[in-house]
Amino acid sequence: MTQAHAPTRWPAAATTVLVWAAAAASLVFWGLRLASPADGDRPPAVSATPAMSIDTQAVARALGAQPAVAQAVRVPDAASRFALLGVVADANGRGAALIAVDGKPPRPFRAGAALAQGYVLQGVDAHGVRVGAGVDAPAAFTLQVPARPGAVNGPPRPAPAMPAG
């Protein structure tokens, strides 16, 4: 028995695979080419020249705005820098006061102590304090102890008597 030589199919199969690979590569190439932005649609280049500066005051004058009048700067009252929260005083004007300076947390100051630059606690009494430039200088201002609010449930009542026993 002789065998007939069957024609080989390898060259035809390899050629078919190469044709399909070329078709797929062509589809990918043209798909990416069409999906990318056109050369003319690129964003504009950034200019190296500086931006034009605009004189806003000149524009305002050209449109009829009047120049602003300088307003006086209001210096706060010296007494408003200090908040007196409490005092402990004796009959001789000595003692201590709990004072908050410039909105900071309150601190205790003894009579004669410097409160802030240029201000000294001159004296303390049961109702307030005197503040001045120095211990022997005239008082620049006084601070009064804030009034304590009354009891919520009425006036204070005497303590109950202890039963004898």
Image: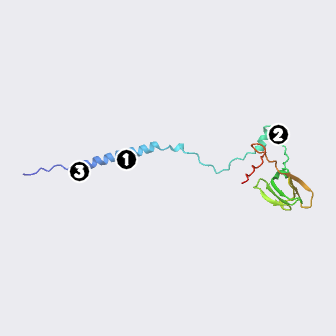
Residue at image point 86% right, 54% down? 126
| Foreground of the two, 105 or 145 | 145
Q: Residues within 10 Å of mark 1 (few under 14, many from 20)?
A: few
Q: Say whether marks 2 and 1 touch (CB < 8 Å).
A: no
* Amino acid on which disc 2 is placed: Gln
Drawn side of residue 55 relative to residue 73, left or right: left
Mark 1 vs 3, N-terminal side? 3
Identify the secondary structure beneath mark 3.
Answer: helix
Residue 11 position, x and y percent, is 24, 50
Label 2 vs label 1: CA separation?
Answer: 72 Å
Q: Seen in the image, is 117 located left or right of residue 16?
A: right
Q: Nearer the viewer, residue 13 or 120?
A: 120
Residue sitting farthest toward the front: 165
| Amino acid at the residue labelled 3 | Trp
Quote the CA–CA distance across marks 1 and 3: 22 Å
Residue under pointer 2:
66
Task: Identify the residue position indicated by label 1 in the image.
Answer: 25
Q: In percent of the image, x 87 and y 60: which residue is there?
A: 94
Label 2, label 3: how many angstroms apart (C-alpha)?
94 Å
Given residues 120 and 51, the one toward you in this image is 120
- Give residue 55's position: percent from left, percent from top: 75, 45
Q: Position of residue 110 (x, y in %)?
A: 83, 61
Within 10 angstroms of label 2, few (less than 14), some, or many (20 or more) residues? few
Q: Which mark is residue 10?
A: 3
